[in-house]
Amino acid sequence: MKKNLLLISLLFFALKFNAQNIIDNGGFDDGKGDWVTWGSDKNVLQSFDVVDESSNNVAKLVIANASGEINKGTLKQKNAFAGLDSSLVYHLSVRAKALNVADGETAQMQFKTKRLKDGANAKYINLDTYELTTEWKKYDAYFYKEDSWNELLPSWNFGAVNGDYYFDDFVLEVNKNIANGNFESDFESTWFKREDNGTVEISNNSVYEGGSAAKVTINTAGDAWHLKLGTKLKIPVDENTDYSLSYYSKSDNGNGKIKLAIDFIDSKGDKIGKTKYVEYTTTTSYEEYNTEFTTPTGTKKILVTFMLAEVVDVIYIDNVNLSKNVATAIRKRPEDNSVKIYPNPANGFINIAGNSGIASVEVSDMTGCRVLKNANVNGRVDISSLKTGVYLLKVTTEKGTKVTKLIKQ
């Protein structure tokens, strides 16, 4: 009987942690559910409610009498999560905004984790801190599971300044790809850089998709390794397995040189086998580049590094992606040119038509922040709630995707 109960428990954890989102009720569909708040001064964190916004439940927390300390308000779940795998990287994300903040003050939110060993010896680790705006925006943090703890309680601190704080779509999931491979999240916590011969920064102008891309300016030509962009977090992989690493890149002059290095790491954190090097020459337009490789026996993780100092140019890199399915990964992302969007510009509704079924429709602002999700209703999308301006509309069909600019009048 005990053996059967053990097998059932193990099956439960396997199912739970293979699911996309480990956090229960992350979108507040069930109201407050297991969500609780904490504050050292109840006069600061005045209220916590689940409110309706555009037919969607969101959390609203009101801060008053703030003292400038970000931990005066905390939102978290009641119970810690057990069963996380120490060989994996995890991804925390949330959508948030802040309203009614006084002029000259900045609302902030901080990712924080409480890590325990068998329910005791709590250790609090602060992750990334972000400034909130008046518009919904997605924020991310990444971390490793360490052997020194086996339970995790994620939380979100806020409340340094007075205002109304809104949260939605809390997600804790296994990060199965390159952390922040699209450069939309916190750069410093996910990528490292070496800038002997130039600079590495984020560009919001020349992007392949979304609102950001990595921009590498080579001021002086030299050995490739004098200017580097690499992953800080090791990426979990399976040994003796075929992978494809893809990314999109271009350069201002069309002669940028990229030397890609992939290092293989064992369970002790040591490099094994030979580093795989592949060289590419960029053009003035974004193109997809692919590197195929097989992980050696004993590989548990990999590190990816772009070395870029050989030729004076400005190189942009976006959408770095790792795929186990090589046959799928080596194909360029298909574009479904049969998709038609009208009217554009538009004010209230737009219509979407095409030769294949529409799987999803997303609308993002020009910074890459998604402002409408699952917006498609029988080929019509209601954009009346959007502010006047230019947006990116992404339509995913059975045949591919269509990304186009959408003008809201």
Image (cartoon, rainbow, N blue to C red):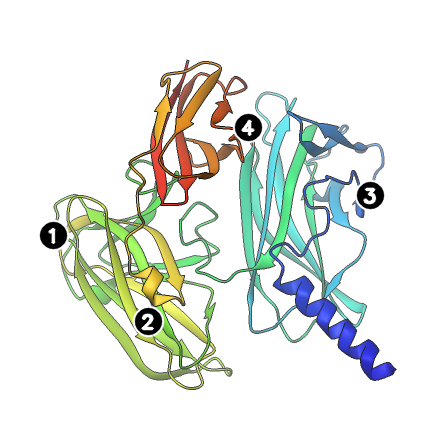
Q: Which residue is mark 2?
A: 262
Say what amino acid the circle numbered 4 marks: Glu
Q: Is residue 208 visible?
A: yes
Residue 248 or residue 156, whichever sits in front: 248
Q: Nearer the viewer, mark 2 or mark 3?
A: 2
Distance of label 4 from label 2 (alpha carbons): 38 Å
The x, y position of residue 404, in whole percent, is 34, 31
Q: Which residue is mark 3?
A: 40
Residue positioned most to the front: 355
In the rendered structure, are the residues bearing label 3 and label 4 in contact, judged by CB atoms less than 8 Å apart? no
Q: Earlier in the sequence, mark 3 or mark 4?
A: 3
Please report the residue visible at 81 percent of the width from the left and 68 percent of the height from the top: 119
Residue 229 or residue 376, whichever sits in front: 376
Q: Which residue is mark 1?
A: 255
Say what amino acid the circle numbered 1 marks: Asn
The x, y position of residue 103, in whole percent, is 59, 20
Q: Secondary structure at mark 2?
A: strand
Please report the residue visible at 17 percent of the width from the left and 53 percent of the height from the top: 282
Q: Nearer the viewer, mark 3 or mark 1?
A: 1
